Each structure stands twice: as C-alpha cells, then as structure tokens.
Image (cartoon, grey):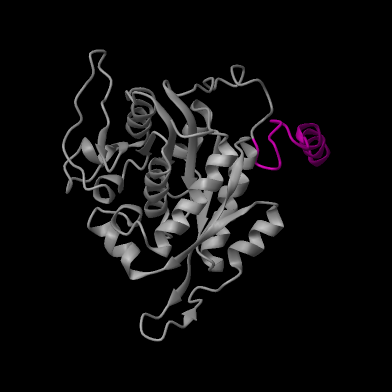
Amino acid sequence: MRRRLFSTVSCLQHENPLGLPRSGAPPQLPRMQRGLPQRRAIPSVRKVIAVSSAKGGVGKSTIAVNLALAFARLGHRSGILDTDIFGPSIPTLLNLSGEPRLSSDNRLIPLSNYGVKSMSMGYLVNEDSPVVWRGLMVMKALQQLLHEVEWGGLDVLVLDLPPGTGDTQLTITQQIVLDGTVIISTPQDLALRDAVKGVNMFKKVNVPILGMIQNMSSFSCPHCEQSTAIFGAEGVKRECAKHDIELLGDIPLHPSICDDADRGKPTVVSEPGSKRAQNFLDIAGVLVSKLELGNAS
C-alpha cells in the first residue's frame, strides 16, 4: 500500500503545472488572446501622462495639479483627470464643485478653472458622501471617466493616480495609451520603497517613465533661512541613479504650498513669481521637451 501511494505522488509532481510566471509578471501573450482590451487613445488629446506615487501622503495630487497649471502657463491646452474614485482631491485643489453637464452625445463636459479643464468623481458625488462601492462598480466609474469625457482638444492631459499598484493602475495602463508617467516621492526610505514598486509596475506594463520628482526635499526656515532636509536629502536621487531614471526636480517643504492647495488656488496660480512656482514651471518645461509637445498653440 505504501509503495502504491508513493508511486501516485511521484506521478502527480510537476515543477510548475499551471505554467505560472515565477517573476509575478503576466504571460507574454497577445493582449486580445489574454482577454485584455486594446489600448485606446483619448479622443482629442495629444499626450497623456500619469502622475503616480504608489504611496499616499507624499503630495502627489498637489504636484499633479501644479504641473497641469504649469503646462497651461507655458501656453499648452491642459487638463487633469482625477482617477481616485474613493478620495478625489482635484475639486478642492481647483476650487470647483457642481455636477458636470452632458454634451449632445452624452459625454461629460469638464469643469474648468485657472485655464485648466478637469474631471473628477468628486464632481459626481456629494463632498461629504463616501463612495462605498465594490470593485466592479469602481471599474465601471473609472472606465466612464477615461472614455466618456468630452475634453474638446488638449495638448496634454495629466492623470492623477490613486496610491497603490492595483486595479485602478492596471485598468488605466491596459485601456489608455500613456505617453509616460512621473513618479513622486519624498526622500524618506519608507516612501521610496513604495515608489520603487510603482517604478517596477510601470516597467512591467511597458509605460515609459519620464522621471521622478522629489517632494518635500528641504525646509527653509523663514527666520534664519537655514535649509534643513527633514526627510533626508539624497533618497530620490539615489533611486534615480539605481534605476536609470531622470530626476526631474525638487519641490521644497513650504507651508505656502500646503496653504495654497487647501484654499483651492495652487502655487503656480497664487504665487506665480515665487521660486516654488518656478520649480513647477521648470519641471513642466522638461516634460514638454520629453513629450515633444513643440511650440505652444
């Protein structure tokens, strides 16, 4: 009896019976063969970039909206799409509210402020109402935001991604033609660990990484003007060198950036002549070159 048992176990042993990828990457089959949708360009939008951090609380949305405003200040038709279904930030950052109107073909018409068009789940639900949805409903809402908005002609659309590397990020990378992504992180190792996961995710799904931005890089005392690297100084620069990614720039830790965001008038608009606003404009200028947007229309 024992001999027969061992014989049966021996026959059932396979090194990898389901052919699962050991690296965690999906099988490299044609997209349609894998049951995945073909990536589509967003109508009337020339370039689409994603701003991601893979971790919450590092200032990603504030940077995303300031970049969109910087593109507009440089003369490009700019928009921003808030893809965070559960915690949308763009309505607050752009001081906008109200339900979007529908076009003649039932597409959502973006709300605009400061020369930037925007769309967000925050316009479609009450400000204090939580979105208590399961995954299927979330994906349906995301697909509508991606495919059913009438942008009316943009040079560049900024996607403000939620934290993580899950369903939302995969849906966007599988359904939309992305011209690149920008990764945001603070210099702190705890934030960088998740930022690197985001870098590796975009590499796996073949989305170009345009560069990284180091946020809250240093604090300059308003009294003595001494600069202090509260979260460290070289973290993002070190990871950029390790992963062969360009460091697009540094954004300082400054109370005005937070105050400007909270009152719905981001730094590029509220303090256009400040060094902080110039940091955003410089980064946007580098991205304009990378995206080959050409002269402003």
| Res 54 seen here | no
Q: Which residues are magenta?
A: 1-25
Task: Name which residue lies at 52% across and 21% down.
Answer: 37
Please tell me which residue lies in front, 92 or 126: 92
Q: Is residue 11 magenta?
A: yes
| Res 84 seen here | yes
Q: Position of residue 158 (x, y in %)?
A: 43, 39
Q: Quadrant of the N terminus?
A: top right
Q: Position of residue 10 (x, y in %)?
A: 81, 36
- Asked if 280 appears above or below 116 in the picture, the reply is below
- Asked if 144 appears above or below 32 in the picture, the reply is below
Classify residue 242 by image quadrant.
Answer: bottom right
Please tell me which residue lies in front, 212 or 191: 212
Task: Name which residue lies at 51% across and 51% down.
Answer: 283
Q: Is residue 291 magenta?
A: no
Task: Name which residue lies at 58% across and 51% down.
Answer: 197
Residue furthest top in the image: 105
Q: Position of residue 185 (x, y in %)?
A: 51, 59
Task: Name which residue lies at 82% across and 35% down.
Answer: 7
Count of marks, rendered view: 0
User: Does 281 sit left or right of 22 as displayed?
Assistant: left
Q: Quadrant of the C terminus?
A: top left
Please tell me which residue lies in front, 140 or 214: 214
Q: Position of residue 177 (x, y in %)?
A: 53, 27
User: Does 141 sit left or right of 56 as displayed?
Assistant: left
- Asked if 24 appears above or below 280 in the picture, the reply is above
Please tell me which residue lies in front, 91 or 265: 265
User: Does 104 sit left or right of 135 as displayed?
Assistant: left
